[in-house]
Image (cartoon, helix red, strand yellow):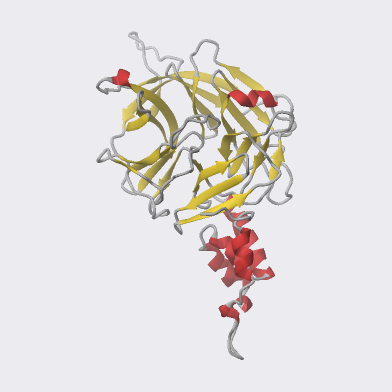
Amino acid sequence: MDARNALVFMGEMISSSKKKNKMEETEEGSSKWTDLPDHINGLIADRLAFPDIFRFGSVCPSWRSISYETRRRRSLSSKPYNPLVLFEYNLRRGTFGFFSFEDNKVYWINLKGAPAIQCVGCSQGWLVMVAPLGTLSYAWNPFTGDRITFQTIHNVTAFEDLSKVMFLSNPFDIDSKKLNNNCIVVDLNSTELKICKLGERACTVLKLNGHGLFIGSLMLFKGEIYAVTAKGELWIINLVGFKPSFRKCEISFDVNVPNAHEYQVECYLVEYEEKLLLVIRFKRRLIRRTVRFMIYSLTETYPKDPKGNVSKNAVYIGKEVPFLAGDQALIIGRFCCKSMSTTECQWLQGNSIYFTDDRILSSMVPEYPEKGIYNLKTGLITPYLPFDLHPFNMPHIWITPSI
């Protein structure tokens, strides 16, 4: 798997386009594929997976235009392209390796001239990169090559303590090819959460102030931002109005795990069938390996006191979900928490959790990243990549192409 000196799979596409296309080597009087009406070619392009849509666009100018419009429409739709796994990212050399489950292949991208010391986020198909001291941090779209420099976002030094950065919309306007100044950015560290627009210098800061620590879980659910603290509180931020407002709610659920003190617990929030799920991950402290997951469906309720008065403060009651639907799977990790259908992604195993390592990406721990598939029915953990990870020792990132 030698790295290819290519940008966005273009090396493969360029080499392919130089070959004579047998489709165009037709007999006299027969039609060429490239002479098909645009609406027929559009129907074909709609059925192509990623990165086949790039290969389609390399055939001729007409197909390139159709490919662009198809990719644009998919990026704006509720059914984007299926995610890939970024399993190797050598930040010093700028080498990135992606695995595609749809065609069972590895693709390499070389990003030159944009050094980074840490990746602190993956959102909307963009990687958020911390640049070396003295240079500005940036967001990079590995599937288009576009880059956004954070000139107005929070102090660059604050990135050192970040655990997650999230865009609530695409930070790049697809039509104008310019920065989307209205894109809301949310970044999270252990003690505070910041919200701002890309086009503004000021930001809203929410501090915990004795309410424990944020434990890395952050998501957008039904138009509001949700985060979990180590004290079992659910912070909900409403973005409507002149300034974001927030409320704190208690999470109440029963966890029965023998010898619980032997485990380190990590929590994730996931939207599943329009419900809010809390996924709890148990890792052995000594060997740092995941052994179990538990899933709870959170329901907002307003409890009553002994006199029958309804409380003004909501409580989220957790009900254990022992199994997922047979055609559903969860992807869990620091930068990606989502549910997916095995009908649309046939390479997924149903009733399973695909998980990645959550250790800080800049730490150089002499071990391979933890990743696997947890089967909720059997409790067994199996690998999700079909090859040996040696010598790739960086935590994996699930990324959905935004092109």
In this picture, residue 222 sits left or right of residue 24: left
Any part of residue 291 in sight: yes
Most distant residue in the top direction: 307
In this picture, residue 306 sits left or right of residue 390: left
Of residue 306 and residue 196, the one placed in the foreground of this image is: 196
Residue 83 at x, y = what percent? 49, 48
Which quadrant of the structure image shows residue 6?
A: bottom right
Residue 150 at x, y = what percent? 71, 34
Say if 243 sits above or below 1 in the image.
above
Residue shown at the point (63%, 27%) measured from the top left: 159
Residue shown at the point (44%, 31%) measured from the top left: 269
Which quadrant of the structure image shows residue 32?
A: bottom right
Residue 35 at x, y = what percent? 63, 78
Which quadrant of the structure image shows residue 325?
A: top left
Residue 294 at x, y = what percent? 33, 31
Most distant residue in the bottom direction: 28
Any part of residue 296 in sight: no
Say if 212 sits above or below 373 in the image.
above
Of residue 381 and residue 364, the one placed in the foreground of this image is: 364
Residue shown at the point (51%, 36%) measured from the top left: 335
In this picture, residue 248 sits left or right of residue 152: left
Say if 218 sits above or below 93 in the image.
above
- Tally the marks: 0
Residue shown at the point (31%, 47%) measured from the top left: 326
